């Protein structure tokens, strides 16, 4: 399955890594590993998580208060957001299809 980070989801991942790394060295790497772990689960079971739009689904991370918004299409997985759960939902509204 081809994975594509749709702008600005790649920047959100980088920002999250940087934020957690500033809090505690090594925590940024742990955040990245958890995001990638859940992306690998999404690859295997793309329709297992909650629908939040007609085509968009949301996967909640376990250790960090973040989620992954994604759209599974054919053999592609489009990551539309990596967001903090306490952020204003309107920030992500235009990325839910």
Image (cartoon, rainbow, N blue to C red):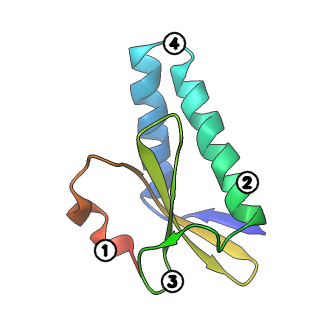
Mark drawn on residue 65: none
Nearer the observer, disc 4 or disc 3? 3
Tag in front: 1 or 3: 3
Which is more N-terminal, label 4 or label 2?
A: 4
- How far separated are the C-alphas under marks 1 and 2? 25 Å
Residue 72 placement (x, y as % from top left) = 63, 76
Q: Is residue 83 above or below residue 70?
A: above
Q: Secondary structure at mark 1?
A: helix
Q: How far, Cα to Cα, is label 4 from label 1?
A: 33 Å
Name the side, left or right, on which 84 lies relative to 42: left
Q: Is residue 19 left or right of residue 13?
A: left
Name the residue that disc number 2 marks. 40
Q: Earlier in the sequence, mark 4 or mark 1?
A: 4
User: Which residue is disc 1 drawn over?
Assistant: 94
Quarter of the figure with residue 37: top right
Callout 2 environment at 10 Å: few (<14), some (14 to 19), or many (20+)?
A: some
Tell me residue 77's x, y (percent).
65, 70
Of the image marks 1 and 2, the number of the one nearer the N terminus: 2
Q: Which residue is mark 3?
A: 55
Q: CA distance from mark 4 to mark 3?
A: 37 Å
């Amino acid at each position: 399955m081809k994975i594509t980070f749709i702008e600005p989801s790649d920047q959100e991942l980088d920002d999250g890594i940087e934020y957690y790394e500033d809090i505690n060295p090594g925590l940024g790497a742990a955040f990245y590993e958890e995001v990638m772990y859940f992306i690998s689960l999404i690859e295997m079971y793309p329709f297992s998580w909650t629908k939040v739009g007609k085509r968009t689904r949301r996967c909640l991370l376990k250790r960090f208060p973040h989620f992954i918004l994604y759209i599974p299409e054919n053999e592609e997985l489009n990551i539309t957001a990596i967001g903090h759960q306490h952020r204003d939902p309107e920030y992500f509204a235009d990325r839910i299809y």
